[in-house]
Amino acid sequence: MVDPEAVARAVLAETATATPKTADGPVEAMRILELATDSAVKGRVQALNQLDAVLVNADPALREARRHLRPQQLIAHCVEMDADGRDDVAAATVHTLRQLARRIHYLAAEIRDFERRIAAAVASTAPQLPEVNGIGPDAAATLLITAGANPQRRTSEASFAALRGVSPVEASSGRPSDAASTEAATAEPTPPSTAPS
């Protein structure tokens, strides 16, 4: 656990030895692209859920005609739907399904673009990382973003594990240790309280 007061005192006394991450270069570019990718993925999932909710509550005839379609087929079908200029619930439903499907298509293309850019940034920054079995462009980008553009600031595996929040934490089973048991067994009993009631 980091003591914020001790950190503040070390900074003020100019005795702090930590080196901050740099906020420029290809690793920072990857961080920004990852941020935008995450946002686009969440938006696409939200739009998919909304499309499904609108379809579930739609007129039974509209819903049943599309029930057999797989998700990608449904989206492609909804993109082509036309409300015919009507101004009723069915037209509003059709218009909403079309707009949600278009949003899903747009966000899917945006996600692919961000992923392509991240893969290119990883390939130019650390081409050896994706060659490791099990590490694709996303995992490599995450490792690079975590380490920062100046990984020399991490002095050990333990400091990297602490940065990621996976370092071992001393934990107790709740049972007293041998030293604590011995101390408790040999301690003087606490005298009864003599305070007036």
Image (spheres, rainbow, N blue to C red):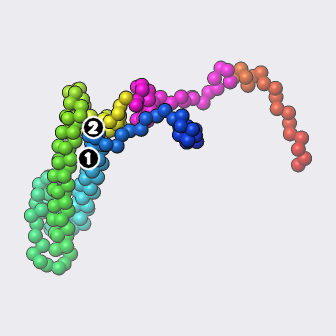
Name the residue at 42% across, 26% down: 155
In magenta, the rendered stretch is 153-180
Q: Nearer the viewer, residue 36 or 42?
A: 36
Residue 24 shows in this picture: yes
Q: Where residue 33 is drawn, which disc sits there?
A: 1
Looking at the rendered structure, the kind of residue marked 1 is Leu
Residue 158 place in picture, x, y as percent: 44, 27
Residue 36 place in picture, x, y as percent: 27, 50
- Please, what secondary structure does the residue beneath circle 2 have? helix
Q: Quadrant of residue 117?
A: top left
Circle 1/circle 2 CB separation < 8 Å = yes
Residue 77 place in picture, x, y as percent: 10, 60
How far apart, in angstroms, are the residues tagged by discs 1 and 2? 10 Å
Name the residue at 73% across, 25% down: 184
Q: Where residue 141 is drawn, which disc sits there?
A: 2
Residue 67 shows in this picture: no
